Every structure is written in structure tokens, then in C-alpha cells.
Image (cartoon, rainbow, N blue to C red):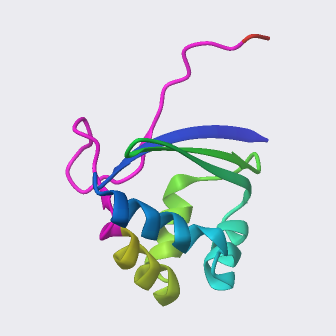
Amino acid sequence: MKRYCLALDLVDDAKMIAEYEEHHRVPRPEIKKSILDAGITQMELYRIGNRLFMIMETVDDFSFETKSAMDAANPDVQVWEQLMWKYQQALPSAKEGEKWVLMDKIFALV
């Protein structure tokens, strides 16, 4: 198992943040399937203000490149991503076109 932590900002608007959260209350089956099919075994989203944190646990051979290619080939995921981008904005430090930014692990208790 691998664990990844990523960050992203939401548009800083209370109504839009509430809408974004509503979209995630009951995941669309086709989106959940695409996540599982890519080798992501657990995913959690956390929010403070307009900052989001995602924690993903994956199979050992998980690849962001493979996930990206699978998403690009999946029309359902493309529709979902277009909808989500309405609510999301890149972190100030993100590269051009980058949404979720992989965080660096700086501490582990064990």
C-alpha cells in the first residue's frame, strides 16, 4: 500500500463550497468505479476554509500517469472534472494546468 496527500483550493465562495460538498455527499457510481479501477483503495477529502486536502491509499503499483490516461479516456470522468473545475482553483504554487498538488511528507510518528 502507498499513501499520497494532495492539496487544492476551492473558489472562496461559501455557496460554491456548499455546492461542491453536496456533489461529494453521494459519489457518482461511475466516478467511484474509475477511482477504484485505477488502484485507489481509499480516498478521503478534508477542507478548512477553501483549502482541500486529499488522502489516498493505493495499491503498490499505482501510477498517477496511468490514472491520468484512464481519466482522459473516460468521458464520464471528463464531464465530472469539467464540473469540478467550476469550484476548484489551482494552488498559487501549482504548475500550469495542475490541479491537485502532491504534498511532501515531512514527519511520521513511527
How many callouts does the rendering have?
0
**Is residue 51 one of those drawn in magenta?**
no
Residue at x-position 24% and y-position 44%: 95
Q: Is residue 46 above or below residue 109?
A: below
Residue at position x 72%, y 67% in the image: 36
Residue at (64, 69) in percent of width and height: 25
Residue 93 horizontal side relative to residue 65, left or right: left
Quadrant of the snapshot with the N terminus: top right
Residue 75 sits above or below residue 53 on the image: below
* Segment colored magenta: 85-108
Q: Is residue 64 above or below residue 107?
A: below
> Is 97 contained in the magenta span?
yes
Using residue 4 as the reference point, say whether residue 95 is left or right of it.
left
Q: Nearer the viewer, residue 70 or 18?
A: 18
Q: Residue 85: give x, y in percent of width and height.
A: 33, 68
Q: Indicate the quadrant containing the C terminus: top left, top right, bottom left or bottom right.
A: top right
Q: Main secondary structure of the magenta part?
A: loop
Q: Is residue 23 left or right of residue 94?
A: right
Q: Horizontally, is 45 left or right of 17 in the view? A: right
Residue at point 42% right, 85% down? 79
Q: Position of residue 33 (x, y in %)?
A: 70, 77
